[in-house]
Amino acid sequence: MLFRLSRKAPTLEHHVKDLALADEGLARIQWADWDMPVLAGIRERFAAQKPLAGLRISACLHVTTETANLVRTLAAGGAEVVLCASNPLSTQDDTAAALVQHYGIRTYAIKGEDTETYYAHIDAAIDHRPQITMDDGADVVGRIHAERPEVLDSIIGGTEETTTGVIRLAAMAADGALKYPIIAVNDARTKHFFDNRYGTGQSTLDGVVRATNRLLAGRTLVVSGYGWCGRGVALRGSGMGMQVIVCEVDPLRALEAHMDGYRVMPAAEAACFCDIWVTVTGDVNVLDAAAFEKLKSGAIICNSGHFNSEINIPWLEAHASKRNVKPLVDEYQLPDGRSIFLLAEGRLVNLSAAEGHPAEVMDMSFANQALCAEYLVKAAANPAPGVYPVPEGIDAEIARLKLAALGVQIDTLTPEQREYLSSWQFGTV
């Protein structure tokens, strides 16, 4: 179907690849829902209480089966939701079709969409005049502040899903540019402890294997960044029999990586050993000329951070000849005859070449999104513009619900123990 790029033209109800994919997408959404019991419980309560009744939400997220279950939950709570993609290569076209056909959600997302279409889809979400924004990378927030300030008056708050977006938003807040409050869902303990570490760790290597069908055991993995995502990638790589090297700029994280048993060294040195390189930093040109000039022929490079700017792809384009070897694998041949293989155009390899995080961990991440939307609506006085943490009560409740869903029981403090922890009189006896 056609999609009008002009904001002045009537916005179509959706723009997806093919509605004929809807039944396939519905089955996959339902499959993911089996492993998302926390979100399902919230959806049941939302359906009964309607805490988001009449609320306009514009969500710019990876259009996956897990995201579909979040959107279903928001809609069950009474919200009017518009969804667009937060990355040109992460959309699951059958999921997008199912959201439109089976759930009546206005969705703007096509896997492989060009830059012009990507931002036209974001504009379609902004045309919804949201009261709450949900971002994964802060592209909607950035677009609103830079080009669509006319919608700011209706916005009460927003949420941000990923590290890169939180970094951007914090910079906006520091500059005094951010005009409404945003909750950093990414920084919730039930998000980054699990989603970033276990989700990114598994899904990144899943993407590498799906794209290349290479054996991981016995190869050398280089991980740039030892935050929660980097920890997860290194842990899973090691578990698959890989030798792991970590590159870091933070001395404490570098020391932690060393104490965890990994080799730690600068990128230019690590390049000499690398078989597979994963960047997960949220920064720019992390993998750059100094490493490219030393990489051995046949090295595979990829990114699991939000933007493909982590890899200096323009340098490769300028200094090497390029050919597509197979879907999601591009070979860059340097003048000296060495070949470097880039996966998924440098975009998130776990979503571009695989299916993203397992539903079990997204259950907690998206439970945070849903409950934070409810929190923003219920807040007696909206906070000043800025970036805020997820309320501790929400974080703890999600952990409690997840444990209950898993059938795991824990101890509770006795009155004596509570008194002890809240007093200072007790000492050495």
Image: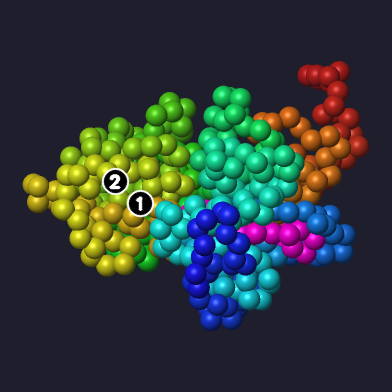
Relative image position of residue 13 (x, y in whole percent) = 62, 67
Relative image position of residue 235 (x, y in whole percent) = 45, 49
Relative image position of residue 302 (x, y in whole percent) = 34, 51
Relative image position of residue 47 (x, y in whole percent) = 82, 64
Nearer-the-camera pick, 246 or 381: 381
Residue 79 colored in magenta in the image: yes
> As shown in the figure, which amino acid type bears the numbered disc 2?
Ile
In terms of image quadrants, where is residue 153? Answer: top right
Nearer-the-camera pick, 138 or 243: 138
Residue 109 colored in magenta in the image: no
- What is the magenta range? 73-89
Residue at x-position 28% and y-position 54%: 342
Q: Are marks 2 and 1 in contact (CB under 8 Å)?
A: yes
Question: Looking at the image, can residue 303 be seen?
Answer: yes
**Side of 75 relative to 301 (left or right):** right
Q: Which residue is mark 1?
A: 346
Residue 394, compared with residue 257, is above or below; it is below
> As shown in the figure, which amino acid type bears the numbered disc 1?
Gly
Q: Which residue is mark 2?
A: 313
Nearer-the-camera pick, 68 or 408: 68
**Side of 236 relative to 104 (left or right):** left
**Side of 198 relative to 262 (left or right):** right
Q: Secondary structure at mark 1?
A: helix
